[in-house]
Amino acid sequence: MKPTNRLKLMTRATTGAILTSTLAVPVANAYQAPPENLPDAPSLNPGDGKFSFSELEAIPTLPYPDFNDPALEFSNSGTEIASSYQLAQFQDLNTTYWAANFISQLLESGIIKGFPNGRFLPENNVTRAQFAATIAKAFNDSEPTRDAISFSDVPRTHWGHEAMQTAYQMGFLSPRGTRFYPDSPMSRLDILTALTQGLGYSYDSTPDLIGKILSLFNDANFVPAEARSVIAIAAMRGMLVNYPNVRSLNVTQTATRADMAAYLYQALVSSGKAEAIASPYAISLEGVEGIPLPAINRSTTTTPTRNVNTPPDN
């Protein structure tokens, strides 16, 4: 069979639905971080609020997750994952974790992988080298848009040298001067910027349209002026996944491995490489008055996402 990175995922949108998956990506190609980069344990960032939509007000986010508690639920969708054996191999993941659906599918595809110590470390920060490694797997059929260059801080012996070159050549990541800064953590905005740039996403949007989209979120004032169009494009492409509060972008927050998995999976959906799966944190602008969406977004969401179609909370 010819190797491919296309994910073929079947979902049902009913409560208690089962997710099944058929994937054609060789797991042998999955990225594995070197043991020397492994922390002893994940650090958890406590949740700090409730959903802002009226229908979800009664469902609190849980501040201190117990990953071994089978009753823990972050989602009101009731969606279960038939392929949960992928999550069961990690002592810090289970099907009730907020990003479990995204992580499970990327694990099966071989795009991401856990660590040798039996942990996935979903709350750990993402470095530029680690992100480059996932990009090289997720979009390995993309054509280079620029020639390879040398990074002064990435020797050929570096474990991520090839992946960083690939991510650069495809337009997802760029150096700062001559340095790539492979160990630098990425913010949520960094990842969204990389994905929109690498996928060549742009849209003929006016300042008024950008303002309308950002006004749907209660922390839009914290989005840097130069990044407002990036967030608007990501929203129109269905790439936003806002946890723990769907109204809060938190773009300057350092991205976790779970954040990266969620954004990356939605980017695969937006580019036609995967089908949408259930998440109460995935943002949809479908049907929001006055916001025209790119054609690729239409009819791609087959499971519940949050439609931002009500005024933001004050």
Image: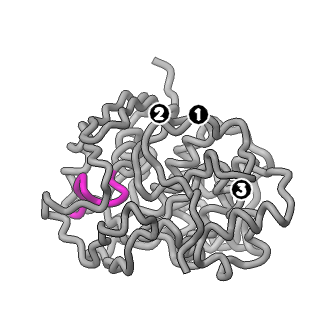
* Quarter assignment of residue 8: top left
Residue situated in front as seen by the camera: 206 or 1: 206
Q: Is residue 106 left or right of residue 115?
A: right
The image shows residue 189 at horizontal and vertical percentages of 62, 69
Which residue has dot 2 on it? 7
Q: Earlier in the sequence, mark 1 or mark 2?
A: 2
Q: Earlier in the sequence, mark 3 or mark 1?
A: 3
Q: Secondary structure at mark 1?
A: loop
Residue situated in front as seen by the camera: 109 or 78: 78
Which residue has dot 3 on it? 233
Residue situated in front as seen by the camera: 88 or 282: 282
Residue 165 seen by the camera: no
Which residue has dot 1 on it? 299
The image shows residue 171 at horizontal and vertical percentages of 73, 53
Q: Secondary structure at mark 3?
A: helix
- Where is 113 relative to 252, above or below? above
Residue segment shown in magenta: 92-100
Q: Amino acid at mark 2?
A: Leu
